Amino acid sequence: MNEYELNKSTGEVQVVEKDDLKEFLDWWLENKITFPPKENSTIYQGDTFGVVLYRKPPFQVELFIVKPGKEIKQHIHPNVDSYEVNLAGYIEFTCDGKVYCDGTPVRVKPNAWHGGLFPKGGSFISVQKWINGVEPKFVGDDWVAHDGSKTYDESTKI
């Protein structure tokens, strides 16, 4: 939903885009409230362990821990808008061809190609807003990759 504000110098009403995912990110990072689901709250696929820290549709926060020397291949999530936040370790996170290594939260819009290298292992959280009427689940199950894999699990076996 958009908000509106009055430009006092021109007297015109302007549309201000409301970014509820950014608001949720800021709230969650400040409060770190956990609200995991009773079912489907942990995964272990390939060399990645994940746990849902918070799920209240349409929002979800997942913690991922990746073994040293691993790569998460370039992929998209068609039904997820997210921020990826490095917690520990050195991660070379890429999004739409740009590399991020400084730990700054990285916005990953739906259908943005992204992935990561974990030379010494690392952990990050994915702060998500699920869209298009899709209920939150393991984000690796909302996956499309260049190699044709349709889930994160499939991509680790190719």
Image (tube, grey):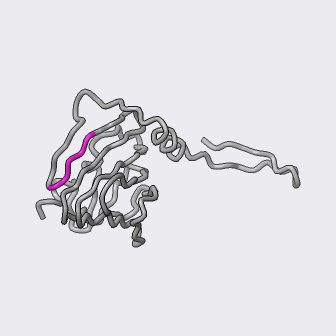
Query: Where 106 sits versus 97, above or below?
Result: above
| Residue 71, percent from left and from top | 23, 65
Q: Quadrant of residue 92?
A: bottom left
Quarter placement of the N terminus: top right
| Residue 157, percent from left and from top | 11, 60
Q: Is residue 71 left or right of residue 4?
A: left
Q: Give the residue displayed 68% in from the left and 49% down from the top.
A: 16
Q: Is residue 107 left or right of residue 116?
A: right
The verdict on residue 97 being magenta is no
Range of residues picked out in magenta: 47-51
Q: How many marks?
A: 0
Q: Give the residue displayed 18% in from the left and 57% down from the top.
A: 67
Quarter placement of the C terminus: bottom left
Most extreme residue toward the bottom is: 97
Q: Is residue 92 left or right of residue 83?
A: left
Q: Give the residue displayed 86% in from the left and 49% down from the top.
A: 8
Query: Where 108 sits versus 62, above or below?
Result: below
